[in-house]
Image (tube, helix red, strand yellow):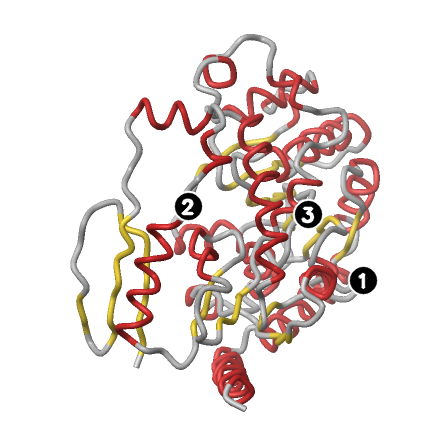
């Protein structure tokens, strides 16, 4: 039997569908005035008592053998230490390391104060708030880790962080299942002739590496004769992060062949990636980004920054290439060398697909997850 607790902005009743019981946890939306107070510092005093009460009520009603909590950054992490049921925390993003890597070199909170914007000066819900919020939540995460008894992750990085912050907990490695369309087209990528198409998937966030994309594209345009286009998936040319970095770096996206294609649905995303030459992951911090894993499964040669959990996904020269964070010269040189070797592209593509197929094998992941559950339940009841 399975139960799912989920946040709800409206009052909804518990219900059971096809053997699964759903528990809506009411978290009311904020009014405009409440939002303003929240952005001006109210987030520091967030009261989770009502959320805890609802979660405990759901636990009492369902009586689970084990609770699977997705992420220490989840609001439901408030249940840690509040129940005698075993809770296994599925490590995702880790807030303290993300806060540490939030601002790229040369950027700080004052970079967003001028010119004047309502978002930063009046509403206070821009990038300065985002950093302060993630830093505050990171401190709360430190305390949450003290209550963790069991956690599961996927990379050496999340294992190391959990060993540091929760040394007495048990760690289980459980990989993640990707979207079905990527399995259907596993290994379908083939080397391309003509224009080089670079692809990256990022979000409207400071630490996702848009600055590295722009600086690298400028170098490729100035210092090489490569005919290229860099397609950035996940944001549009209207997003504030684009305008900010273009102004800060004095680089026009259009002038350096960077094109923003927005958010793509799964089928279109698969098609776009299969038409690309390489996949570049420029982030300043990440654990196990699905976008990178999906690109590897398709067979794209991947170049990624050596940060967080990414070295657990990319073996240098075998399943992809690693460059330091904020390293446009190294990244440009790697793109150039990869462009000139179809043989290397084919080798990386084959190795990446085979590794990703093993890492994201659905049956093995399912069996490993069930074994993890059984191990935790047995140990908890000894």
Q: Which residue is at a point 70% across and 40% down the rendered structure image?
A: 101
Q: Which residue is at a point 31% across and 24% down the rendered structure image?
A: 32
For the residue carrying disc 3, how many other residues have a C-alpha within 10 Å: few (<14), some (14-19), or many (20+)? some
- Relative side of 352 to 232, left or right: right
Q: Are marks 1 and 3 in contact (CB under 8 Å)?
A: no
Image position, residue 186 (x, y; %)? 53, 69
User: Which badge, 1 or 2, comes first in the chain's sequence?
Assistant: 2
User: With respect to residue 106, does 89 lie above or below?
Assistant: below
Looking at the rendered structure, the secondary structure element under dot 2 is loop
For the residue carrying disc 2, how many other residues have a C-alpha within 10 Å: few (<14), some (14-19), or many (20+)? some
**Label 1 to label 3, Cα distance in Å?**
27 Å
**Which residue lies under the disc numbered 1?**
317
The label on residue 64 is: none
Q: Which residue is at a point 61% across and 70% down the rendered structure image?
A: 356
For the residue carrying disc 1, how many other residues have a C-alpha within 10 Å: few (<14), some (14-19), or many (20+)? few
Foreground label between 1 and 3: 3
Image position, residue 87 (x, y; %)? 49, 71
User: Which badge, 1 or 3, comes first in the chain's sequence?
Assistant: 3
**Which residue lies under the disc numbered 2?**
264
Looking at the rendered structure, the secondary structure element under dot 1 is loop
User: Which badge, 3 or 2, comes first in the chain's sequence?
Assistant: 3
User: With respect to residue 335, does 117 lie above or below?
Assistant: above
The label on residue 97 is: 3
Image position, residue 18 (x, y; %)? 20, 76
Give the quarter of the image for residue 189.
bottom right
User: With respect to residue 116, does 225 lie above or below?
Assistant: below
Quarter that holds the C terminus:
bottom right
């Amino acid at each position: 039997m399975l139960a799912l607790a989920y946040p709800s902005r409206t009052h909804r009743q518990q219900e059971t569908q096809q053997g699964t019981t759903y528990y809506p946890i009411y978290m009311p939306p904020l009014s405009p005035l409440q939002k303003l107070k929240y952005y001006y510092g109210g987030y520091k005093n967030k009261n989770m008592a009502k959320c805890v009460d609802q979660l405990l009520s759901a636990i009492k009603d369902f009586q689970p053998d084990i609770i699977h909590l997705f992420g220490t950054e989840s609001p439901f992490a408030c249940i840690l230490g509040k129940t005698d049921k075993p809770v296994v925390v599925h490590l995702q993003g880790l807030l303290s390391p993300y806060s540490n890597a939030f601002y790229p070199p040369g950027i700080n909170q004052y970079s967003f104060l001028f010119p004047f914007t309502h978002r930063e000066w009046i509403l206070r819900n821009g990038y300065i708030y985002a950093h302060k919020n993630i830093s505050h939540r990171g401190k709360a995460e430190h305390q949450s880790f003290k209550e963790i008894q069991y956690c599961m992750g996927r990379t050496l990085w999340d294992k190391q962080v959990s060993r540091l912050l929760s040394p007495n907990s048990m760690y289980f490695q459980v990989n993640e299942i990707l979207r079905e369309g990527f399995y259907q087209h596993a290994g379908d990528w083939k080397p391309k002739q003509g224009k080089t198409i670079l692809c990256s998937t990022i979000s409207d966030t400071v630490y996702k590496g848009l600055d590295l994309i722009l600086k690298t594209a400028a170098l490729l345009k100035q210092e090489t004769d490569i005919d290229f286009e860099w397609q950035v998936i996940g944001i549009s040319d209207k997003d504030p992060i684009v305008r900010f970095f273009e102004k800060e770096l004095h680089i026009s996206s259009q002038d350096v062949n960077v094109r923003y294609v927005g958010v793509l649905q799964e089928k279109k995303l698969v098609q776009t990636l299969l038409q690309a030459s390489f996949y570049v992951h420029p982030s300043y911090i990440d654990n196990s980004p699905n976008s990178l894993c999906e690109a590897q499964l398709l067979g794209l040669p991947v170049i990624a920054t050596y940060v967080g959990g990414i070295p657990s996904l990319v073996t240098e020269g075998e399943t992809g290439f690693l460059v330091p964070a904020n390293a446009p010269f190294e990244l440009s040189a790697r793109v150039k060398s990869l462009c000139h070797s179809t043989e290397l592209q084919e080798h990386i593509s084959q190795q990446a697909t085979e590794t990703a197929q093993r890492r994201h094998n659905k049956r093995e992941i399912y069996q490993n997850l069930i074994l993890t559950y059984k191990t935790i339940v047995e140990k908890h009841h000894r």
